[in-house]
Amino acid sequence: MYMKHFNPTAKLLANLIIVLGSLMVFDPYTMVMLFGVSFLFAIFTKSFNHKNLKMMIPLICFAFGMLWMNASLARVENPEIIATFGFLTFTDKGFIVGTVLFFRILTIGVTSILFTCNTEPDALILSLIKQCKLNPGIAYGVLTALRFLPSMESDLTLINAAHKIRSSKEKKWYKKKNRWYRNAIPLLATNIRKAERVAIAMESRGFQTNMKRTYYRTVNWYRKDTVFVLVTGIVVIFIILFSNYMGWLVGFKRWQGF
């Protein structure tokens, strides 16, 4: 079964369960198991594609940076040096802290990427309205804000084109100055005007906070969605209990990072 077949609210709840489980444990064994379950679920549901894998590259780089920085710079008690590289000294407990953060970042990143790439914004908003009783006025406002993001890219392209037309000569790349405010101010003004027009249009069509509406498309909650959320919670609880039984579990504590 593909992940897109589940209710968006069910996917959101499952994602929150895994994220909370990852934040509440601080040992490498439990984190590796949580990451393994998330990764295997992504493979089983065929949720990985070329786009998802490209999105994982900067996430892996960030997680690896947290790994080596904590392994070399973490403030831990009674550390033992396991390796040196130039002026950097790697300790055993610092490496453990870095490993936990490495797999925590990957676990949260994998589940979040799978949720965003397999969930339509329209379906998510409609599901939150029906299943979570979210106010329709707030929900459609959030949906409108999400619709602004793709248009900002096209607006930025037009602004850059206007700057090129107004400039008489094309400067060399090493002479160009990245004046961010030349694009930021026109982009901000353009989106403020769009937001004002959208607000007037929504108000004229009855999109108030206390409105009662009918919907052309409804997103229903099925038995498979309940099973999906329950299975996710049971798996996370089982991993934590198994880790506690094996003596690996380290509960939530203050981060001792660099």
Image (cartoon, rainbow, N blue to C red):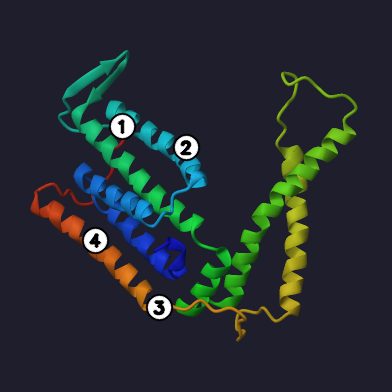
Residue 115, position in %: x, y? 45, 58
Say which label, 2 or 1, has the lower sequence index: 2
For marks 2 and 3 on the same chain, the one whose residue lies earlier in the sequence: 2
Residue drawn at (70%, 36%) of the image: 180
Q: What residue is disc 4 on? A: 235
Residue bearing mark 2: 58
Question: Marks 4 and 3: which is nearer the front?
Answer: 3
Q: Nearer the viewer, residue 131 or 71?
A: 131
The x, y position of residue 186, in whole percent, is 78, 46
Q: Are marks 4 and 2 in contact (CB under 8 Å)?
A: no
Tell me which label, 4 or 3, sits earlier in the chain.
Answer: 3
Q: Residue at x 45, y 42 (%)?
A: 56
Mark 4 and mark 3: span between their CA atoms? 20 Å
Q: Quadrant location of the N terminus?
A: bottom left
Q: Secondary structure at mark 3?
A: loop
Q: Which mark is residue 222?
A: 3
Disc 2 versus disc 1: nearer the observer: 2
Depth check, mark 2 against mark 3: the one in front is 3
- For label 1, the residue is 70
**For numbered disc 4, what is the local secondary structure?**
helix
